[in-house]
Image: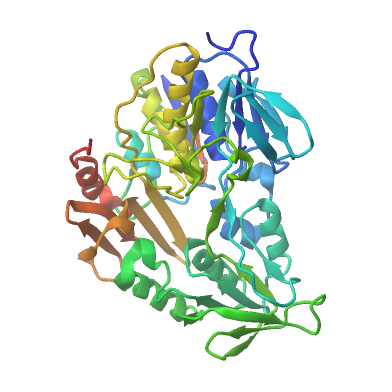
């Protein structure tokens, strides 16, 4: 049955993954009720501009909203209250405001939140950068004369550093990694990106951590930071970008594998004895048969679209009493990044590579870098050379599928 | 017929659309987006995928 008369599908998470799964359910023929639960008060919106254009020019959430297909016009959006718990056996989700929602099928799209490190000292002046509200709070404090400390040298940290430099702030990146973005880019390209940042005036303290924040009092603002190597740096604004934590707490007590996000199969289905459940996006630890077939979480912007499409098809089939397509999942991971006037673009899973090869150009100019493991080419990254990636992407798509 | 428009004030020439529908979207030698304003109805699914994956959500499909 397609949900006729029943409570239908509840999607927990009103981000890109939740939206794309709703659209995919409709495209696959599911006509029953869909309710989407979101902790933020906003309809699904695009987060990448929060460290770039929106941070520099102002945060207009309605302007960042994703275009929603007409097929999801009848979706009920329950925004501003997070999921608190779920009972798969009873087929209910309880929200933070106490509301209990029944479901026939559940979509887990609750994503991630920034990780916070337990560092002593004042908290005023310390910011995360995940939501539109976070970005607005940072924006009001950014500008010429600000001493910005960025914890973490990943993409969010590096993009924010570039934006803050454009706005005239003094910027220092502190990270334990030996090079910026080293996990996806490798040490050579990471070092080359570091040189670009340094040419724009960013200071790096790598291989170090922050021991403490200092201020006039713990109730006041951060005024300086103490590093593990003994250095003390002035700070008027700290941005914490040291990775993520999956929002899985509300699923505890249901016997699910929550060891790193939520484990799913190639159809994005979550194994359990009670209800049809799928997971999508940042939270879904899924196998990809184009690569090693081992389940990974991939926090790239295009994965909510790729996994949401598959998950919607799976759920529509299950709700219609049909066997879903269980063929291997081969969605192509992709990311891009904008830092100063440079465009990074990647396909595949460069982080799986054990060695990198400079294929075109040179590290300090436009270039293409290949990433290989024992199985061959697993990923590619370009700087200012997106059109050159066509053959590399094709080569990755043509990898033998792991079964 | 599928009608396509791109808000060139939003477009940042990331080229993601080109990988979904390379007969409709492409980057020229300067890395700037060029696209066809119309495509055959048979291309609708790929063109909608291209709109879905646009990082700036600059593509409208009718």
Report the front residue among A272 and A38. Answer: A272
Q: Quadrant of the C terminus of chain A?
A: top left
Give whichever of A77, A227 is nearer the camera. A227
User: Residue at 71% across / 54% down in the picture?
Assistant: A133
Horizontal side of residue B16 vs A34, given as left or right: left
Q: Position of residue A119 (x, y in %)?
A: 65, 74
Q: Is residue A12 left or right of residue B52?
A: right
The residue under the point 73% across, 41% down is A41
Residue B51 visible to the viewer: no
Identify whether B51 is placed above or below A139.
Answer: above
In the rendered picture of this protein, how many numbered marks are placed on residues?
0
Residue at the (30%, 72%) spot, across then down: A188
Residue A291 pos. (x, y %): 27, 45
Colour setting: rainbow
The quadrant where residue B34 appears:
top left
Residue A190 vertical position relative to residue A370 in the rendered view, above or below? below
Q: Position of residue A348 (x, y in %)?
A: 31, 49
Residue for point 30% across, 33% down? B23
**Which quadrant would residue A182 be assigned to in this image?**
bottom left
Q: Position of residue A227 (x, y in %)?
A: 57, 84
Would you place residue A213 above or below residue A271 in this image? below
- In this rendering, is residue A256 above or below A389? above
The answer, for residue B27, to whether it is visible in the render is: yes
């Amino acid at each position: 049955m397609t949900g006729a008369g029943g409570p239908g599908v509840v999607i927990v998470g009103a981000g890109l993954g939740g939206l794309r799964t709703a659209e995919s359910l409709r495209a696959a023929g599911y006509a029953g009720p869909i309710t989407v639960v979101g902790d933020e008060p906003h309809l699904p919106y695009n987060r990448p501009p929060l460290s770039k254009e929106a941070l520099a020019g102002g945060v207009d959430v309605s302007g960042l909203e994703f275009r929603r297909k007409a097929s999801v016009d009848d979706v009920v959006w329950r925004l501003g209250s997070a999921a608190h718990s779920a009972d798969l056996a009873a087929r209910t989700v309880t929200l933070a405001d106490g509301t209990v929602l029944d479901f026939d099928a559940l979509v887990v799209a609750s994503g991630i939140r920034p990780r916070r490190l337990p560092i002593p000292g004042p908290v005023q002046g310390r910011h995360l950068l995940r939501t539109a509200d976070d970005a607005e709070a940072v924006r009001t404090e950014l500008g010429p004369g600000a001493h910005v400390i960025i914890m973490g040298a990943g993409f969010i940290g590096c993009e924010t550093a570039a934006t803050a430099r454009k706005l005239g702030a003094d910027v220092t990146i502190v990270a334990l990694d030996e090079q910026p973005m080293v996990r996806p880019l490798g040490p050579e390209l990471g070092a080359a990106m570091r040189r670009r940042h340094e040419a724009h005036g960013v200071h790096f303290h790598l291989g170090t951590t922050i021991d403490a924040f200092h201020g006039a009092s713990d109730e006041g603002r951060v005024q300086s930071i103490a590093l593990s190597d003994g250095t003390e740096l002035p700070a008027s604004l700290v941005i914490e970008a040291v990775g993520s934590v999956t929002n899985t707490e509300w699923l505890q007590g249901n016997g699910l594998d929550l060891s790193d996000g939520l484990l799913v199969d190639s159809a994005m289905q979550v194994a359990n004895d009670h209800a049809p459940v799928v997971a999508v996006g940042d939270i879904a630890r899924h196998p990809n048969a184009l690569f090693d077939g081992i389940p990974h979480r991939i926090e790239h912007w295009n994965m909510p679209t790729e996994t949401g499409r598959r998950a919607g098809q799976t759920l529509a089939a299950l709700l219609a009493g049909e066997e879903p397509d269980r063929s291997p999942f081969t969605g192509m991971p992709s990311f891009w990044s904008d830092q100063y006037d440079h465009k990074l673009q990647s396909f595949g899973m460069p982080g799986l590579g054990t060695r990198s090869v400079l294929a075109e150009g040179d590290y300090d100019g436009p270039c293409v870098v290949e990433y290989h493991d024992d199985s061959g080419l697993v990923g590619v990254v370009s700087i200012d050379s997106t059109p050159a990636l066509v053959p590399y992407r094709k080569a990755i798509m043509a990898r033998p599928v792991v079964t | 017929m599928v009608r396509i428009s791109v808000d060139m004030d939003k477009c940042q020439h990331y080229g993601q659309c080109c990988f979904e529908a390379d007969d409709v979207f492409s980057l020229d030698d300067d890395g700037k987006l060029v696209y066809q304003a119309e495509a055959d109805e048979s291309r609708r699914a790929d063109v909608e995928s291209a709109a879905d994956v646009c990082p700036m959500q600059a593509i409208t499909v009718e």
